[in-house]
């Protein structure tokens, strides 16, 4: 016999024992225990039989008849409610039992010829029974749970266990080791080493001097001036691209084949210079690979510690959640509770509708909120209804803030498309990210550049990479592409909707503005665009946002054509005079004010992103 059967047997035994509990001539625990047990998934017929058997042993006949009727009436009411609404809340069962006790007590007092008890005793018994049902229901549900572990824990194969975390940590260390190997390889070379100069000399003399009768005189004697002249020749070719006239003239005084030597030296040096460029490019690609391996190691470590499974420590909370799901007609197959790095909860459940009806996921979110004692909302991409089929759902702890975004754009005069691209992205963990990229130039090419930047950033962020890592990997992809002129700015703002903290990441981007209640703050940057160098400088700034404040991102086409000495100050004045609290209207009004400075012309692509934050 498994544990669940043993627990049911204990329940039936307790149904007998409750008949011995007397209070002021009443037996309120009998109907209360029966109703609480009846609402659990047990054999209801056996529960009724054992309850009647216990009354037959310990309760007078008159009280036995009364409480038997109370149990039957309560059972009928609960069944009817379950049939009509596909679920039955605990308070419905408590009310049914309490009203039944009150009515049957009143009827018994009317029929009783002899001495009668005070009327308020029946009312007190009714209230007592209802209260005991509310108290006993979660206790019995807890008792009937499958042990102290969450349901499905023992048989779950895809749960994040400590062993999985250790494996991810091991993989992360392996990738980090590979990254160090690539990073410790030979660094970039800006000039030729003495060994390489010697090889160039041997190559030139092998082609020109070997057939000359004076070769031994020129190169075998250490006092020969050819060594010095050759060094000066290579140095002049390296710095000027050709031989200096003085060096050429001195070389002609010692060697009859000076023209051939100079011509061959220029060819050999150009070939060596090309090899040096390819060698440096190879080292650059190795550095990019090292960065990407570092990023992979970081994401593995982050995944290993992103969620901490606290299901075993919070079994009471999970039991409370399952109890409230049961009240709403939901069968729970698996349930797990995780804690994020920021301390927020994430609940994962595998459920189905008990009666095959459709139950809104919002009802499940309410049950999760009540059980966990904190506001929970359905996770991203969660379905809206639950039916008879088992589904896996995720609920996240609700954020303290919410945001609204707005955008306004203008395309450069006579251009077909805008070279600016933008994105609004909601990430797991309660982050709202808005990103803006301005491709160099305008038109289709600039549009392709900025679109590629935004798409790469979106993919990296959705995969779980940190902001700095995503930007660096995007820059690496642009550098590897290797096309001239493929440069784009990156302007990103990430708002933590739990704390209201906003992080700004800028690479060659225009100034960003924060519209506070009493002032407008400007955040500027002086870094170069992405795609120029392998190593980029990411300027990060953090600010605490409050209720009703706005973040404004814009491209340089907005500020550059204000035609004023201090365009940032002018933009602060413009934002300070805008009264609307609608982000879309604010972005539109900003461009309308800008056009007043440009006489209605659009000399460059203009894009304005506005995000407002409010308390929930």
Image (cartoon, rainbow, N blue to C red):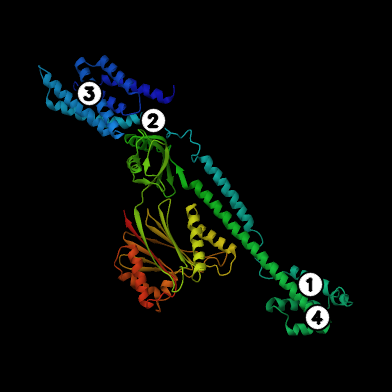
Image location of residue 342, percent across then percent down = 42, 50
Q: Which mark is residue 201?
A: 1
Q: Looking at the picture, how far across and down is residue 283, in whole percent?
A: 64, 62
Q: Residues within 10 Å of mark 4 (few under 14, many from 20)?
A: some
User: Disc 2, disc 1: CB below 8 Å?
Assistant: no
Q: Residue at x 10, y 18 (%)?
A: 115
Q: Is residue 188 visible?
A: yes
Q: Which badge, 4 or 1, is on the more N-terminal residue?
A: 1
Could you tell me how far apart the alpha carbons at marks 4 and 1 are, in whole angstroms? 14 Å
Residue 336 shows up from this direction: no
Residue holding disc 3: 70
Cβ–Cβ under 8 Å for marks 3 and 4? no
User: For the residue labelled by badge 3, is the local secondary structure a helix, a strand or a loop?
Assistant: helix
Residue nearer the viewer, 274 or 542: 274
In the picture of the structure, the residue carrying the numbered disc 2 is 145
Mark 3 and 2 residues: CB-CB less than 8 Å, in contact? no
Q: CA distance from mark 3 to mark 1?
A: 111 Å
State the residue at coordinates (59%, 59%). Answer: 288
Crowd rating for badge 2 (residues with CA inside 10 Å; few <14, some 14–19, many 20+) = some
Callout 4–callout 1 Cβ contact below 8 Å:
no
**Image-quadrant location for residue 50:** top left
Q: Which mark is residue 258?
A: 4
Closer to viewer: mark 4 or mark 1: 4
Can you say whether 251 is above or below 385 in the image? below
Give the structural element (helix, strand or loop) at label 2: loop
Q: Earlier in the sequence, mark 3 or mark 1?
A: 3
Q: Secondary structure at mark 1?
A: helix
C-alpha span from label 3 to label 2:
27 Å
């Amino acid at each position: 016999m498994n544990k669940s059967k043993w627990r049911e047997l204990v329940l039936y035994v307790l149904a007998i024992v409750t008949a011995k509990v007397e209070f002021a001539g009443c037996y309120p625990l009998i109907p209360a225990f029966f109703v609480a047990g009846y609402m659990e998934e047990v054999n209801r017929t056996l529960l009724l039989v054992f309850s009647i058997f216990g009354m037959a042993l310990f309760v007078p006949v008159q009280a036995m008849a009364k409480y038997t009727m109370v149990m039957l009436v309560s059972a009928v009411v609960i069944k009817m409610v379950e049939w009509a609404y596909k679920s039955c809340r605990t308070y419905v069962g408590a009310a049914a039992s309490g009203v039944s006790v009150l009515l049957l007590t009143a009827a018994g007092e009317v029929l009783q010829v002899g001495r009668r008890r005070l009327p308020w005793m029946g009312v007190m018994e009714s209230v007592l029974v209802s209260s005991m049902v509310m108290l006993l229901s979660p206790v019995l549900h807890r008792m009937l749970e499958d042990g102290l572990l969450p349901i499905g824990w023992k048989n779950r194969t895809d749960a994040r266990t400590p062993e999985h975390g250790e494996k991810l940590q091991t993989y992360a260390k392996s990738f980090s080791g590979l990254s160090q190997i690539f990073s410790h390889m030979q660094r970039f070379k800006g000039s030729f080493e003495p060994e390489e100069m010697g090889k160039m000399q041997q190559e030139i003399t092998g082609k020109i001097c070997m057939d000359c009768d004076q070769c031994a005189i020129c190169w075998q004697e250490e006092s020969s001036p050819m060594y010095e002249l050759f060094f000066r020749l290579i140095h002049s070719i390296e710095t000027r691209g050709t031989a200096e006239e003085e060096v050429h003239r001195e070389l002609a005084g010692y060697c009859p084949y000076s023209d051939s030597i100079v011509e061959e030296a220029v060819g050999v040096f150009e070939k060596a210079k090309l090899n040096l460029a390819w060698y440096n490019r190879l080292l650059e690609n190795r550095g990019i690979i090292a960065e990407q391996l570092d990023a992979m190691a970081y994401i593995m470590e982050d995944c290993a510690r992103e969620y901490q499974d606290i299901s075993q420590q919070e079994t009471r909370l999970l039991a409370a959640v399952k109890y409230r799901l049961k009240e709403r007609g939901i069968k729970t197959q698996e349930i797990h509770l995780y804690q994020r790095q920021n301390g927020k909860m994430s609940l994962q459940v595998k459920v189905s509708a008990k009666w095959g009806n459709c139950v809104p996921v919002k009802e499940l979110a309410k049950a999760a909120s009540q059980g966990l004692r904190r506001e929970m909302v359905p996770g991203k991409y969660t379905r809206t209804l639950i039916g008879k089929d088992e589904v896996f759902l995720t609920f996240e702890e609700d954020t303290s803030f919410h945001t609204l975004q707005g955008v306004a754009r203008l395309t450069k005069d006579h251009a077909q498309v805008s070279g600016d691209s933008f994105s609004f992205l909601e990430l797991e963990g309660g982050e709202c990210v808005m990103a803006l990229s301005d491709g160099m130039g305008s038109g289709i090419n600039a549009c392709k550049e900025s679109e590629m930047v935004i798409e790469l950033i979106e993919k990296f962020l959705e995969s779980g990479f940190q902001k700095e890592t995503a930007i660096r990997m995007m820059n690496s992809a642009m550098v590897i592409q290797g096309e001239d002129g493929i440069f784009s700015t990156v302007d990103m703002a990430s708002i933590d909707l739990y704390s209201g903290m906003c992080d700004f990441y800028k690479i060659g981007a225009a100034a960003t503005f924060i519209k506070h209640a009493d002032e407008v703050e400007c955040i500027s940057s002086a870094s170069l665009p992405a795609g120029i160098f392998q190593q980029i400088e990411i300027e990060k700034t953090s600010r605490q946002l409050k209720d009703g404040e706005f973040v404004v991102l814009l491209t340089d086409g907005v500020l550059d054509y204000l035609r004023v000495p201090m365009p940032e100050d002018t933009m602060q004045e413009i934002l300070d005079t805008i009264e609307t609290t609608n982000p879309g209207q604010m972005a539109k009004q900003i461009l309308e004010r800008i056009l007043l400075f440009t006489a209605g012309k659009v000399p460059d692509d203009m894009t304005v992103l506005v995000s407002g934050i409010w308390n929930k």
